[in-house]
Image (cartoon, rainbow, N blue to C red):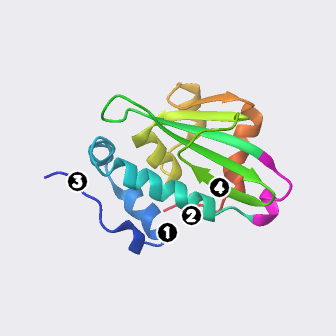
Amino acid sequence: MPQTLPDLAAFSLEELVAYTGELSDDALAELMGGPDRSTLLDEYFGRIARQAIPEKIKGQDAVVHFHITERPDGGVDHYEMVVRDGACAISKHVVESAKVTVTLDGVRFIKLISGKADPTKWFLTRKLKISGDMIFGGKVMSWFDIPTP
């Protein structure tokens, strides 16, 4: 039976992380290969922006691009995160030059963001690609309060 998403808007961030963290790789691959891919990615990226820790992003001026590969049509989903003036905004419209670009497939993105992966191992095995200022890129996720299951 095809994997379908529940109403994610009804989930707290902790529930969303727990839900996706419990999915098997096959179930995640099915979601990332189907019509719910954009819904799940948009939900996560929207929530990331709201989880910025004010004291950590204060004074930051950074643009990070995320390229989520292996879309069903062979394309890539692009997200741009702009941290500026103590605020974080995420858009699907990439317009600014990035300080760092993160590239990985949809299944790996969900596993990474839900705390079910080792980003260092994936980086070393080229399953996670970071271009630009890699030292800066390693710090970015520490600016956000993302729960783990």
Q: Amino acid at mark 2?
A: Pro
Mark 2 element type: loop
Mark 3 element type: loop
Q: Identify the mark nearer the N-term, 3 or 1.
A: 3
* Separation of marks 3 and 1 at Cα, in angstroms: 20 Å
Q: Identify the mark nearer the N-term, 2 or 1.
A: 1
Q: Identify the mark nearer the N-term, 3 or 4.
A: 3
> What residue lies at 44% left-to-right and 33% top-to-bottom?
76
* Mark 2 crowd level (few <14, some 14–19, many ≥20, 10 Å Cα): some
Say above or below: 84 vs 76. Answer: below
**Residue closer to the observer: 105 or 38:** 38
Mark 1 element type: helix
Say above or below: 86 vs 28. Answer: below
Which mark identifies residue 14? 1
> What residue lies at 79% left-to-right and 59% top-to-bottom?
56
Q: Nearer the viewer, mark 2 or mark 3?
A: 3
Say above or below: 58 vs 13. Answer: above
Residue 58 located within the stretch drawn in magenta: yes
Which mark identifies residue 89? 4
* Separation of marks 2 and 1 at Cα, in angstroms: 6 Å
Mark 4 element type: strand
Residue span colored magenta: 54-61
> What residue lies at 70% left-to-right and 38% top-to-bottom?
137
Q: Identify the mark nearer the N-term, 4 or 2.
A: 4
**x, y percentage for residue 120?**
61, 35
Q: Nearer the viewer, mark 3 or mark 4?
A: 4
